[in-house]
Image (cartoon, rainbow, N blue to C red):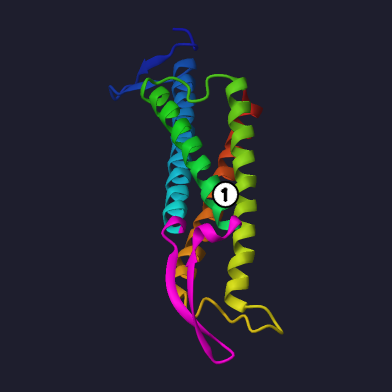
Amino acid sequence: MSEQKTASIESSGTLTMSGPLVAATEKTIRRRRTEAMQLILRALSMATSVVSLSLMITAQQNSSVSIYGFRLPVHSKWSFSPSYEFVVGVCVAVAAHSLLQLLIGTSRFLRASSVIPSRTHAWVLFAGDQAFAYALMSAGSAASGVTNLNRTGIRHTPLPNLCKPLHMFCDHVAISIAFTFISCFLLATSAVHDVIWLTQH
């Protein structure tokens, strides 16, 4: 029989596969695993963005501070800071982007089609992932600066550490910023996967 046969029956009676059929099957399995990982990254990116968004928009608190011996009421809310509003806006955009790509990718994955159908689609994904990753990094960095100022106050001025009386507000914001950076990392990882796909196709 020809050496190029794709199946043979061993003396034990076990059917073994070899040749192009096995290679094609293994390639398909590897592709499906890679696509599943891409979809998981999309889902995690959407989830972390939603968590960051939820924590930020619920960050508000009323309290009072002492300045030169006078007790003054203070009210803090995320919408008072443009940097925090920037975080909210970017997280909404990232969640929408991730959800859209997750729905499209899952639909194609369940139909056993390629999650990334063409190089054009891959380039669009790469551009979107990279742009949103940079936006998240920028928003997180800006919000971190404001939060740090709230915690330390301003030297040589009576402005106190606002996070002492407004600890719940500051905790919400800090955790929200942490999830913002996590979402940034996940999108950056997705962008790397996009580049790998482009180099292989």
Residue type at numbered disc 1: Cys
Image quadrant containing the N terminus: top left
The residue furthest left is: 13
Examine the rendered structure and indicate whether residue 97 appears above or below residue 13.
below
The residue at 62%/21% (across/down) is: 120
Furthest residue to the bottom?
69
Q: Which residue is mark 1?
A: 184
Relative depth, front residue between 183 and 108 = 183
Residue situated in front as seen by the camera: 166 or 188: 166
Q: Of 200 and 156, which appears nearest the observer?
A: 156
Residue 158: name its quadrant: bottom right
Residue that appears at 48% across and 45% down: 45
Find out whether residue 96 is within the magenta segment: no
Q: In the image, residue 106 lies at what x, y percent?
A: 40, 29
How many numbered marks does the figure carry?
1
The x, y position of residue 46, in whole percent, is 45, 43
Left or right: residue 166 compared with residue 138: left
Figure check: 161 above or below 201: below
The C terminus sits in image quarter = top right
Range shown magenta: 56-82
Q: Residue furthest right?
A: 156
Residue at image position (70%, 82%) is 155
Looking at this view, is 16 or 44 the one in front?
Answer: 44
Q: Residue 193: where, in percent of width, then height?
A: 58, 36
Q: Residues within 10 Å of mark 1 (few under 14, many from 20)?
A: many
Q: Secondary structure at mark 1?
A: helix
**Which residue ends up furthest to the top in the rendered image?**
1
